[in-house]
Image (tube, coloured by chain):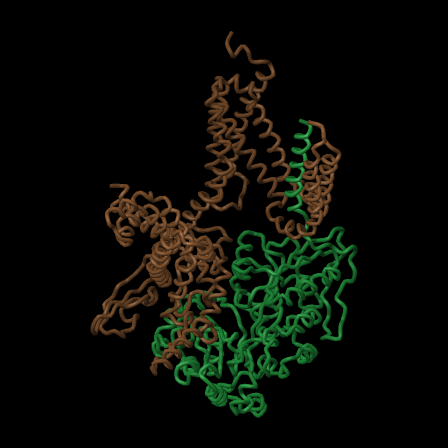
């Protein structure tokens, strides 16, 4: 009897303790005492540090934050940064969550958590999602917090992303005085062509980097290199690009076209310029047969040494660094418009509209976007700092390989006129992509002609805009 | 002397208090329902929540009032009602308390600290080992505990305590109590105490006796009590969401903001289709239908004319087409080979158990993992499938001096083959499980039937056709119907294998994928719910047809 009672009691204690341990505080241990107010300056880009919270809090405020890493190395770096900032931010205890699982990608998981009310206080979203989150009231308008922060300036970041980050959907205004600030860009990126120099040399094709320096790197030169390398064998390809809106848009932009009209309120994929870009892109697959079949992932083929020019963003660099052939990068070739039509990709740290600690969350967002923090992350090779500063760019050039890091900077330079990735404030970007993506794929795989595409695409795509 | 007169004063008091309690409960429930609409109670709650809570409170109020009357009449039904209401309220209060204390969302924290406590679980294991060792000392006196036994118990206890300390049990308790110290948390704790007290009070055997409870009443109550965890789980996690999704299908819910009632608008959009005659096969859709509303889904061409099929939501119809096509091929491909394979594996040849395990393996493998592996296999340029096809063609070309062209199949990037690539994976993965089901069915067929057939001179084919197949009819029906339902819900394979999941030119968009995209990526939960219900109707219809066919053809029915 006594024995039974003892074990019953133990069982109850164990069960209760498990349940209660489950609701324990986050695993990240708070620092014993707040240390410095601001991050220390480094040899990396010198930027003013974010303002710390007004006064030391009596008790640490717990802030969860999340950003999408591309690999374990980035997870480790973000975790390390979280620990550092935890020590630096006064009265704040941070918990970093990588987000995303094998079966649920980052955005899907985040959306579900936002709907369930369990999303972190601060999280990263891609630039195309900002309007969707902002207009639904899911992210905090930090304009007032920013106005009260002397060290923050909208002009410290690339103008393209900041246009959208400061867009006020109620007034249509954008800029520092628009009354809207949806977050701060985490980083920027752009496309370049990753080159397999062994294949290019073997084919006797001109070096694209030299052509770019001489200002002769255009579509014709690109096609020439692609054809010469393709001639090396049936399993060798001159060019490889992935199947999504980014690579498609480059050709459209470079021809002087665009996905949207000037104020992004209607589809413009049926303009002659856009169709010219699409026609050239299609010719790479159909007429000249120089490209990895559209829809096949070109990255493993490139890494296997079978693609001469692989179009991808800076985020692909860590993976490419493991290949065992000679490689480098070059900017995208100029199209008929005189520019490469590149994108300025970006994503931003935003604040959960339901956070209980907006001031602390804002301090974290600033801390995550200092030059020092961005420098630490950019050193991995996957991103370019979103702060506009010569120091930041100089530091980026040292993150080799590739040797020709300048190609990425050329892609986002003002004179290259990159198109900033951005949301549709007058419509739904996911819906637009849902309509146009498969239609472009139909053209590139030969199921539809460019003419038929041009005749029908905007009738369908215009439905996603709010009239 | 009547039973009533045997009631002791304590029980009498309890019953009187219970009557008052039931009255108070009824009044509070009714007041809650009224305040929900006319007071400040849950002002932000959406309509569906208000309706649901009102219904629950109204039912509780009515039953509580009935319970009060029945208890006052010393009727056992009063006890039943009282126990049921208090039990449900008690469980609800526990859930609210746990939720207020953030137990449910704190499971991750335990997962993070659990591993740090594992060494201390080793101490527990050591204690258990010591207690087992005790069994090897037979010289102990019967009924007496050896010092080893006592030691082992304390070691286990100590290990557990250290483990709980290490995983943060103390911190957890403090955090839980801190979170609980707010109005809702305190109210739920009070609720637990009050409902717990009345559960005990009315559940006592003395109270039961006073209310003329018979043995069968207690048995019924025990039955429901044992059933309640599953029943509550079913109601909360299955039936509840089912009803809710039906409601959402009539709203513009985005899962975040308060949904607006839109009636049949979602269903109307799904089912809004047009057929139009084409004067030529290449005539543009906008010339024959209102392109501001409709998009072309497909066209049926005959001669120099044709019929255009357009829909307000073309993606739904493309998804339906792909889903049905998938089912049409995936079901036979995962059932017929499974039937053949099960007959082979049912033989008494040596090593059959090994092969059974091998064929079953794909069924237990994670879909994500195998889809990624197949993604590599399917790669058109460096994938193994095309590699072996190329090798084979080269071999035959060299051997017979042929000029067969290597097709270099673009498995996942060509709209003609993409869905077929998904079908192959699904069939490959499902076949093993179906084989096991068929094997079970085969082993239930009496051997005498085959012996008799052998005596009658039947060959293997005759036996298979005339005995095996008819006798397997119930298993076949089960396998076909479950595989069909599974096929109509295809999602993971497409989602992981294809990039983008919709595939080239929407060739692999399926209904579940489309509803997932709509609900979770485009914030259209209402519309996604409507798609889910249409899919339910499609699956229900197909299953119904299968049931009817089964009845017609089954030897058991006739």
> Is B329 left, or right, of B148 in this rendering?
left
For the question of whether residue B488 can be seen, the reply is no
Name the residue located 66 percent from the left edge and 26 percent from the top edge.
A1
Residue with the most extreme left position: B303
Q: Is residue B429 above or below residue A437?
A: above
Which quadrant would residue B418 be assigned to in this image? bottom left
B281 and A283: which is toward the camera: A283
Number of numbered discs present?
Answer: 0
Whole-percent x and y of residue A44? 73, 75
Query: Taking A18 as reference, is B536 left or right?
Result: left
Pick the residue in front: B132 or A197. Answer: B132
**Residue A82 falls left or right of residue A462:** right
Q: Which residue is drawn at 63% across and 65% down?
A: A72
B31 above or below A218?
Answer: above
Say if B329 sits above or below A408 in the image: above
Quarter of the C terminus of chain A within the rendering = bottom left
Q: How far across and down, in percent of the image, does residue A466 sit?
A: 43, 65
Q: Residue B82 or A256: which is nearer the viewer?
A: B82
Q: Is residue A307 visible?
A: yes
- Quarter occupied by residue A48: bottom right
Chain assigned brown? B
Residue A52 in picture, x, y percent from top left: 73, 62
Spot the green chain and give its letter.
A
From the viewer's side, name the closer residue of B453 and B85. B453
Percent position (x, y) of residue B550?
28, 46
């Amino acid at each position: 009897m006594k024995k039974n009672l003892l074990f019953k009691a133990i069982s109850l204690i164990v069960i209760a303790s498990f349940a209660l341990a489950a609701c324990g505080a986050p695993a990240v241990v708070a620092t014993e005492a707040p240390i410095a107010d601001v991050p220390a300056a480094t040899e990396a880009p010198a930027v003013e540090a974010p303002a710390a919270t007004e006064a030391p809090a009596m008790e640490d405020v717990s802030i969860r934050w999340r950003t999408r890493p591309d690999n374990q190395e980035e997870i480790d770096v973000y975790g390390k940064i979280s620990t550092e900032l935890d020590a630096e931010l006064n009265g704040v205890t941070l918990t970093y969550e990588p987000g995303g699982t094998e079966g649920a990608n980052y955005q899907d998981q985040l959306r579900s958590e936002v709907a369930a009310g369990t999303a972190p206080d601060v999280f990263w979203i891609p630039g195309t999602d900002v309007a969707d989150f902002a207009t639904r009231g899911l992210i905090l308008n930090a304009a007032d917090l920013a106005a009260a922060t002397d060290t923050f300036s909208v002009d410290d970041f690339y103008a393209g992303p900041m246009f959208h980050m400061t867009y006020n959907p109620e007034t249509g205004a954008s800029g520092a005085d628009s009354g809207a600030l949806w977050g701060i860009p985490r980083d920027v990126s752009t496309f370049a062509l990753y080159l397999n120099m062994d294949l290019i040399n073997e084919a006797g094709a001109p070096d694209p980097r030299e052509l770019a320096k001489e200002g002769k790197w255009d579509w014709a030169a690109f096609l020439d290199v692609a054809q010469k390398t393709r001639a090396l064998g049936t399993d060798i390809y001159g060019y490889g690009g992935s199947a999504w809106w980014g690579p498609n848009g480059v050709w459209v932009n470079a021809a002087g076209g665009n996905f949207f009209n000037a104020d992004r309120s209607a589809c413009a994929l049926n303009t002659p310029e856009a169709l010219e870009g699409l026609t050239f892109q299609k010719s790479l697959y159909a007429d000249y047969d120089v490209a990895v079949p559209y829809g096949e992932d070109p990255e493993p083929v490139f890494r296997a040494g079978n693609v001469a020019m692989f179009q991808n963003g800076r985020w692909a660099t860590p993976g490419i660094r493991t290949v065992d052939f000679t490689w480098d990068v070059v900017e995208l070739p100029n199209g008929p418009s005189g520019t490469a039509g590149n994108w300025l990709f970006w994503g931003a740290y935003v604040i959960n509209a339901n956070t209980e600690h907006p001031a602390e969350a804002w301090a974290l967002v600033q801390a995550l976007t200092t030059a020092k923090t961005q420098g630490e992350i950019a050193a991995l090779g996957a991103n370019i700092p979103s702060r506009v500063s010569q120091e930041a760019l100089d530091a980026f050039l040292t993150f080799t390989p590739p040797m020709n890091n300048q190609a990425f900077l050329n892609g986002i330079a003002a004179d290259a006129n990159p198109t900033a990735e951005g949301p549709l404030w007058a419509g739904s970007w996911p819906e637009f992509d849902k309509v146009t993506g498969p239609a472009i794929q139909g053209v590139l795989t030969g199921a539809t002609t460019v003419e038929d595409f041009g005749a029908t695409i905007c009738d369908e795509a215009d439905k996603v805009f709010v009239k | 002397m009547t039973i009533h007169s045997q009631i002791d004063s304590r029980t009498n008091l309890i019953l009187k208090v219970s009557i008052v309690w039931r009255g108070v409960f009824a009044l509070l429930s009714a007041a809650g329902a009224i305040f929900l609409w006319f007071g400040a109670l849950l002002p932000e709650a959406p309509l569906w929540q208000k309706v649901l809570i009102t219904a629950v409170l109204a039912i509780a109020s009515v039953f509580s009032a009935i319970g009060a009357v029945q208890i006052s009449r010393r009727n056992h039904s009063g006890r039943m009602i009282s126990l049921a209401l208090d039990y449900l309220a008690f469980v609800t209060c526990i859930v609210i308390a746990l939720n207020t204390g953030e137990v449910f969302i704190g499971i991750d924290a335990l997962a993070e600290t659990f591993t740090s406590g594992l060494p201390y679980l080793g101490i527990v294991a050591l204690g258990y080992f010591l207690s087992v060792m005790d069994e090897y000392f037979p010289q102990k006196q019967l009924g007496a505990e050896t010092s080893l036994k006592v030691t082992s118990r304390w070691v286990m206890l100590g290990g557990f305590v250290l483990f709980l300390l290490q995983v943060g049990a103390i911190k957890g308790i403090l955090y839980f109590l801190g979170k609980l110290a707010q109005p809702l948390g305190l109210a739920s704790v009070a609720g637990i105490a009050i409902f717990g007290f009345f559960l005990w009070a009315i559940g006592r055997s003395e109270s039961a006796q006073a209310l003329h409870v018979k043995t069968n009443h207690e048995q019924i109550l025990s039955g429901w009590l044992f059933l309640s965890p599953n029943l509550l789980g079913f109601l909360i996690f299955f039936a509840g969401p089912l009803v809710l999704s039906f409601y959402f299908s009539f709203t513009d819910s985005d899962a975040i903001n308060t949904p607006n009632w839109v009636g049949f608008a979602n269903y109307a959009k799904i089912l809004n289709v047009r057929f139009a005659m084409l004067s030529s096969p290449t005539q543009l859709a906008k010339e024959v239908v209102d392109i501001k509303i409709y998009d072309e889904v497909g066209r049926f061409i005959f001669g120099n004319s044709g019929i255009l099929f357009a829909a307000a939501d073309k993606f739904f119809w493309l998804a339906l087409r792909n889903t049905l096509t998938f089912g049409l091929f995936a079901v036979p491909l995962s059932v017929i080979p499974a039937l053949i394979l099960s007959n082979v594996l049912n033989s008494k040849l040596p090593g059959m158990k090994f092969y059974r395990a091998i064929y079953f393996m794909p069924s237990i493998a994670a879909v994500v993992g195998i889809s990624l592996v197949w993604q590599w296999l399917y790669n058109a340029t460096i994938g193994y499938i095309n590699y072996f096809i190329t090798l084979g063609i080269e071999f035959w070309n060299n051997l017979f001096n042929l000029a067969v062209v290597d097709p270099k199949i673009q498995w996942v990037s060509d709209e003609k083959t993409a869905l077929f690539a998904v079908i192959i994976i699904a069939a490959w993965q499902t076949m093993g499980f179906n084989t096991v089901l068929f094997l079970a069915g085969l082993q239930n067929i009496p051997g005498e039937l085959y012996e008799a057939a052998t005596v009658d001179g039947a060959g293997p084919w005759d036996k298979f056709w005339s005995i095996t197949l008819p006798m397997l009819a119930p298993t076949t029906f089960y396998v076909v119907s479950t595989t069909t339902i599974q096929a109509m819900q295809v999602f993971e394979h497409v989602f992981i294998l294809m990039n983008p999941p919709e595939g080239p030119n929407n060739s692999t968009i399926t209904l579940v994928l489309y509803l997932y995209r709509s609900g979770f990526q485009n914030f259209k939960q209402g519309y996604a719910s409507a798609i889910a219900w249409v899919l339910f109707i499609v699956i229900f219809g197909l299953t119904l047809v299968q049931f009817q066919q089964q009845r017609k053809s089954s030897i058991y029915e006739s």
